[in-house]
Image (spheres, rainbow, N blue to C red):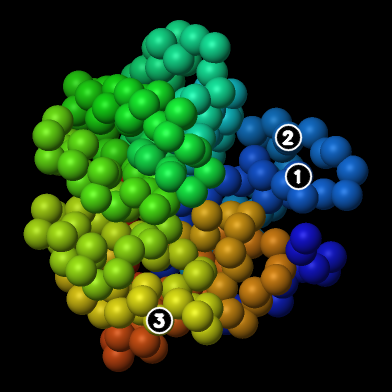
Amino acid sequence: MYRSEPAPLPEPLPFPVADSHTHLDLVDTFGAEEEVPVPEADAPEVRARLDEAESVGVARVVQVGTDVDSSRWAAELAGADARVLAAAALHPNEAPRLADLDAALAAIDAVAALPRVAALGETGLDYFRTDEDGREAQRRSFRAHVAIAKERGKALVIHDRDAHEDVLAVLDADGAPDRVVLHCFSGDFAFAKECARRGFFMSFAGNVSFKNAQRLRDAAAVAPPELVLVETDAPFMAPVPVRGYRNHPALTNYTARFLAEHLGRDLESWCERLWANTEAAFGRW
């Protein structure tokens, strides 16, 4: 699935940025030829990934949960390393699979109460992998996450795949939290304008650099600079020029560079902007 050798690291950035969405628990386990257990949150290999990222200017990360166990793992990592904030949630595709969705949501609420859990996410809607039979559970889960985020004063991190209109409809109907992040932004320029009108952050992953991703680049071009974030969504979607490698937080550097060049921004001031945006979305580390 991925190239076996590690991706070449970029030169350090002139000003640090944050990886606004990563899955460090999966970086060295997902897609392995043999089953590899998830490392402990304080394992040396996890700290090594954070050290590596910091060495090239990716100084902070948001570790994101997709179920109860990974959300607890994220909270443990954030408690063990000051470079990390956590997000806790049930992934949209997880909701229809659960025998007791209410119990899982209660467990997520308990994790969200922890002080270094900065967001509820990734939640939202995914119509690519879930058919109509599972979508009601997705919507119920999404609305519950929106409510928890507002009650606890946390950001909301949204996974939106082939569901742009319905995502906005839920947020408009229920009332969005003060801080909303569209993770791995996948819409076109028109959707970007709708998100910008609502003050939502748009986080761009490595796929914005792919050859066939012109619509994402068009969206990035109309997104207000103060609402743009960068992420890896590691271990997925490593950016050009390291596409095909296993993604990890250090490679956020390449995406920040790509966007600076694409948008005609000075790299240092662009990185400063990205850092300020991430703190505005998630709070200070």
For this orientation, the residue located farthest to the right is 34
Q: Hey, which quadrant is residue 185 in on the image?
A: bottom left
Question: Given contact means CB atoms under 8 Å apart, are the residues at marks 2 and 1 in contact?
Answer: yes
Query: Looking at the picture, which amino acid does disc 2 mark?
Result: Val
The quarter of the picture where the N terminus appears is: bottom right
Query: Looking at the picture, which amino acid does disc 3 mark?
Result: Gln
Say left or right for 81 vs 194. Answer: right
Residue closest to the eye, 257 or 99: 99
Q: Earlier in the sequence, mark 1 or mark 3?
A: 1
Say left or right for 141 vs 73. Answer: left
Q: Earlier in the sequence, mark 2 or mark 1?
A: 1
**Of labels 2 and 3, the one closer to you:** 3
CA distance for labels 1 and 3: 31 Å
Quick one: label 2, few (<14), some, or many (20+) residues within 10 Å?
Answer: some
Q: Hey, which quadrant is residue 37 in on the image?
A: top right
Q: Hey, which quadrant is residue 222 in on the image?
A: bottom left
CA distance for labels 2 and 3: 36 Å
* Position of 98 relative to 20 (above/below): above
Q: Label for residue 214?
A: 3
Q: Position of residue 118 (x, y in %)?
A: 34, 36
Kindly identify the residue that appears in the image at 34 percent across and 43 percent down: 157
Quick one: label 3, few (<14), some, or many (20+) residues within 10 Å?
Answer: few
Residue 28 seen in render: yes
For this orientation, the residue located farthest to the front is 132
Q: Label for residue 101?
A: none
Query: Looking at the picture, which amino acid does disc 1 mark?
Result: Thr
The quarter of the picture where the C terminus appears is: top left
Q: Position of residue 243 (x, y in %)?
A: 65, 74
Quick one: label 1, few (<14), some, or many (20+) residues within 10 Å?
Answer: some
- SS under mark 2: loop
Q: Label for residue 38?
A: 2
What residue would you read off at disc 1? 29
